[in-house]
Amino acid sequence: MASRRSRDARDPVLDMVFQAASGDNLPLFKALVTVLDMGRGRPKEAIEALRVQEAGKLQGFSALHVAATRGSLRVCRYLVEELLIDVDLVDKEGRTPLLFATYHNGGTAEYLLDHGADQDKANNDGISLLHYAAESGNCEMLELLLAKGAYVDPVAPHGTPLHGAAGEGQYGAVKILLDHNADYNKMVNGVTPLMAARDANSTECIKLLVKVQEEPMLKREIMASELISLGSISLKKKDYAVAAKLYSRAMQLDPDDAVLFSDRSFCWLHMGDGRKALLDANKCRKMRPHWPKACRQQGEALMLLKDYEGASEWFLDGLKLDPVDTDIEDAVREAMKSLKEGEPWRSGKAAAL
């Protein structure tokens, strides 16, 4: 295999090759490859060996890196399709031609992606192509990489692409990443994207990140409200089974709503299930101990279970909380009457706890 050549003043051929690649001068580029090959019939090896050897940011740079960076599509096609150069060859820092194409030019980036370049390839520091595009605010490249299947949340030492975009105040990039379901709660080294935006004093990015964090909560509230509304409609139609199911689903979204337990207890009562009615009434009472309606529903559940003594006590508790509630007053009388007419199968408030 041919040895790598140094790019310096003593190697004018290397300079000419890179200039031809940069200018997309395919005829000159092919002619120079022939010179490099020296009649051995191995042009691929000859061009692959041509790398920048001098220490610096471009160390390990190849002709494909140069062509990709400058948008030289004809040279890229020749290298990839005719010479079969590896589209993911890396320089000294582990950077691929696609990284530079992504950073500078869309035409060659799309070409390399269409010919097998790895859209998730990271450099030696773990920084991905998406990081570069996000942090530079290159929205076109972000969209292209994501459309080609790039993973939206790769983690580099300084965070995800969303961290980088937020930290640089790149509003457009932040929005694109969020639209592709980037993890806005991801914490890297104790920092979330929102914190990164705050550190950068990026007001627009802060607003966007705060809004997207509030949306799931708002959505849950809307969903719970819709389920409650549907439950109320079913209740008016006396379709208690459907109403109970709707209230149960609403409870999954809002488990601390005492009214939901009260309404579902009402459904169980009308379906003749005293045990479930009592469980929901007890839960409601724990949440709102001073709500007369909760006491009344506890009593009604115990009436259904024929625990008239316990029902009387709960009704009396409700009457103490609301002495002018005639419905509870009537319930007390009914419970006392039932208690006199027959022995309860269980008695006392302990039955309801």
Image (cartoon, grey):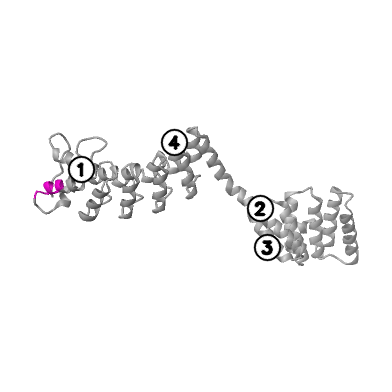
At mark 1, the secondary structure is helix
In-front residue for pair 175/196 = 175
Q: Is residue 99 magenta?
A: no
**Do the residues bearing badges 3 and 2 touch, measured as CB atoms within 8 Å?**
no
Residue 85 showing in the rendered view = no
Which marked residue is nearer to the observer: mark 4 or mark 3? 4
State the SS at label 2.
Answer: loop
CA gap, disc 1 and disc 4: 35 Å
Instruction: Give the x, y percent position of residue 233.
Output: 74, 60
When asked about the image quadrant of residue 298, the answer is bottom right
Which percent across, then down, holds residue 312?
85, 57
Q: Which mark is residue 168?
A: 4
Q: Is residue 158 left or right of residue 244?
A: left
Which residue shows up at 33% across the image and 48% down it?
Answer: 107
User: In the image, what residue occupies the spot 33% across and 52% down?
Assistant: 113
Q: Amino acid at mark 3?
A: Lys
Examine the rendered structure and indicate whether residue 327 appears above or below residue 242: above
Residue that numbered label 1 is attached to? 20
Q: Which mark is residue 245?
A: 3
Residue 255 - label: 2
Camera-side residue: 219 or 325? 219
- In the picture, the quarter occupied by the C terminus is bottom right
- Label 4 crowd bin: few (<14), some (14–19), many (20+), radius 10 Å: many
Query: Where are the magenta residues, as a range?
Result: 31-38
